[in-house]
Every structure is written in C-alpha cells, then in structure tokens.
Amino acid sequence: MKYIVADYYPGFACKCGQCRANCCIGWPVTISREEHDRMLQAPCSQEFRQEIKEALRPNFAPDEARYAHIVHDKLGRCRLLGEDGLCTLQKNAGEGVLPDVCRLYPRNRRSVGDIAECALSLSCEAVTEAALASREPLGFVETEIGEEPLFHIDMSREQYAECGRAVEIMEDRRNTLTERFTILGEELFGCMEKCSGEEGELDAVRVLYQLASDFSGKNKVAGPLCMEALRFFGISGKEKLSREEAKVLLDRYREAQAHVFPGLEGWQEAAERLLITHMFYNNFPHVGGTNDGSRAFYGLAAIFSFVKFIFTGNLGRWDSGEQIADVLSDLFRLIEHSDFKYRASQAYRRQAEFSPGCWRQLVNL
C-alpha cells in the first residue's frame, strides 16, 4: 500500500540495542486485552512465559482497549528488556507477538480520508538524527508499506488542504521563522491581535517559565531538562513571576541565546525541519481531526519557543551532535506523548488575557 512519508523515512531504521535512549525505558505502555492475551499465549518456554506474566499487570478498572500495562523495574526499564538493549519477548517469540505500540513505534500509520500517511515521532533519537541530517527543506514522497493503516482520522478535504498550506508557509525560506509564524497565524487562523512593547515580552517569558515549572517534576524524561533550565537561568520555585523577576529571566535568557545560537550553523533550517516533522506527525492544525485551529497554532508557537528555552538552558548538557539530538528527542517525548500541546495553548491563553497577541513576542524570544 502506498503511503505519504517524509523524504528521510525510506532510510529510517530502528537502532535497536545501539540506542542511547532506549524506548523501553521510562515510558508507561498500556496494552489491550487482545495484546495481553496474545503475549501470554506466545510460543515460548514455560520459564519465559512466567517472565511475561510478571511483566504484565492489569489496569485499575480495565477495558478492552486499555486492559493492562507493562511493568518497569526500579530503573524504569521494561521488565522484558534484555541487558543487550534488545526485547527478550521478540527474541523468544517473534515480532508478531509484540503489542502494536512496541512493534510500530515511532511510526504513526494512519489514513486521512482516502490518503494513507506514515509519520515518524521526534521522540525517537534516530528520527531526530535523520531530521537533522540535512538542512534542505523537508520533502514528502510515496513509499510502499506492506500493512494497512492502524487508524483513521476523519478530516474533510478542506481541513487536509489547510494541513498542506501550513507546511508550505513554514517551509517558505523567503521569510524568517518568526515571519512565517506571523503569516501562519494571520492567514489560516485569523490571529490578528497584536501586543507590542516590553509587557508582551515579559508575558511571553512567563509562559515559558510556567511550562518549565509545570513539567519539571512531572515527567521522568524531560523533567530534569526543565529543572536544569530553571536552575541555569537562576529563577525557580515561584508560582508566578513578578514584573521584576520576569525581566531578570528575560535578560538572562537573551544573554544565553547570544552565546548559543550564533555558534549553531543552520539552526533555523534545522528548527524548520523539526517543526515540519512535528506538524506532519500531528496533522497540524487538525490534530486528530479537531477543528480548533487557533488553539493548535498557539500550541505550536509555545512548542517552538519552549524547545529553544529549554535547549538554551541546558547548554552544559551538549557539545556534540549526538547530545543535541538527545536533548531534542527527550523534549519531544514530552511534547508528542503527553498533554503538553493542550497545556501549552492554555498557558498562552491565560497569559494573553493580560497581553493579547503576545504570541508574536513568544515566537520572537
């Protein structure tokens, strides 16, 4: 079956045991009743079947779709992950026994109307590395995949065309990234509100502080990155930032940026490719077929600025391409596999009550 994919998809491959941030570590994995039973009936020795049983635990108030979850050890590792970084279930019983999430990750295989798409999640370090391997505009090609779409997204042709138009706008290198966000917000979503001056900038940095604070202790993977950024900028533990505190944070952030981004050649092109990969993965702006385009737009603006903010605040964590990819993929584990997008747009809208239109300052920070 023909699927539309990003141009680097045909060369993508799982790194298996060579992965630095194995996807079997730190993730809550829920499985269906059918997958649970399939695992327990796997063709394997009785000894290994007992290991499978010990790795599964029924959910509280289970249903057919969310029947059980895979147990982690004290280090957050899947109980079926071998010391060599490979899945013992797959080694002992074959790939067909794996739950769908384990077999397909980081692929998002879906149908949108009569079009089949397969996107890749930036939460996988191999995907992030592939996205960053080129500075050319991200293209899309057709490729053959021998499986049917995993799920269907109900989207009109008009909505699908908006998804394509959003990509066109964000890939137009005649404009800066900030200018592209302005065109995207005004043309597709009618976000015409404006907020000028320092107050808008202070409210924008308050959005970033709030998001970093909210997730610093609530996410095992990206939480430490958020805490490190707040420590780096020297302001944490505040429920709300006063004007003076927001000004200090803004000044420190800008000073750090002056050291970070001039030394990263082609960073805007790299950021563009990451944004387009994320937008394609989520069918932006109609995430899951929803029709609240302005909320999706505010969320995307917050995501772009949040990644820059946390990335800058973790200057001490990276000095190579691999470490840069690790920081970015850890952040997208949070962004693409939690309620981050919703909470990001909500954080913006709460602050926008004071500074309507500060999304312009947000993407410009």
Image (cartoon, rainbow, N blue to C red):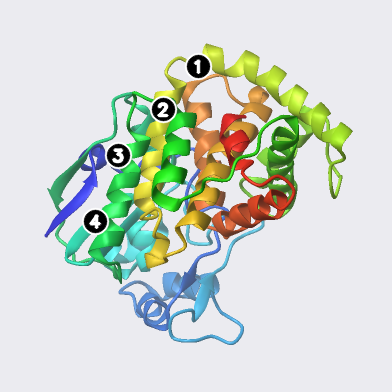
- Disc 3, disc 4: CB below 8 Å? no
Q: CA–CA distance between discs 2 and 3?
A: 16 Å
Tell me which residue sits at (33%, 58%) in the image: 104
Q: Which residue is mark 2?
A: 270
In this view, 254 is above or below 19: above
User: Residue 168, which numbered label?
Assistant: 3
The answer to which of marks 3 and 1 sits earlier in the sequence is 3
> Number of labelled discs?
4
Depth order, front residue of 265/64: 265
Q: CA–CA distance between discs 4 and 2?
A: 23 Å
271 sits to left or right of 113: right
Q: CA–CA distance between discs 1 and 4?
A: 32 Å
Q: Secondary structure at mark 1?
A: loop
The local crowd at label 2, few if under 14, some if 14 to 19, many if 20 or more residues have their Cα within 10 Å, is some
User: Residue 264, which numbered label?
Assistant: 1
Q: CA–CA distance between discs 2 and 1?
A: 10 Å
In this view, 83 is above or below 130: below
The local crowd at label 4, few if under 14, some if 14 to 19, many if 20 or more residues have their Cα within 10 Å, is many
Q: Quadrant of the C terminus?
A: top right
The local crowd at label 1, few if under 14, some if 14 to 19, many if 20 or more residues have their Cα within 10 Å, is few
**What amino acid is labelled 4 in the image?**
Glu
**What amino acid is labelled 1 in the image?**
Leu
The answer to which of marks 2 and 1 sits earlier in the sequence is 1
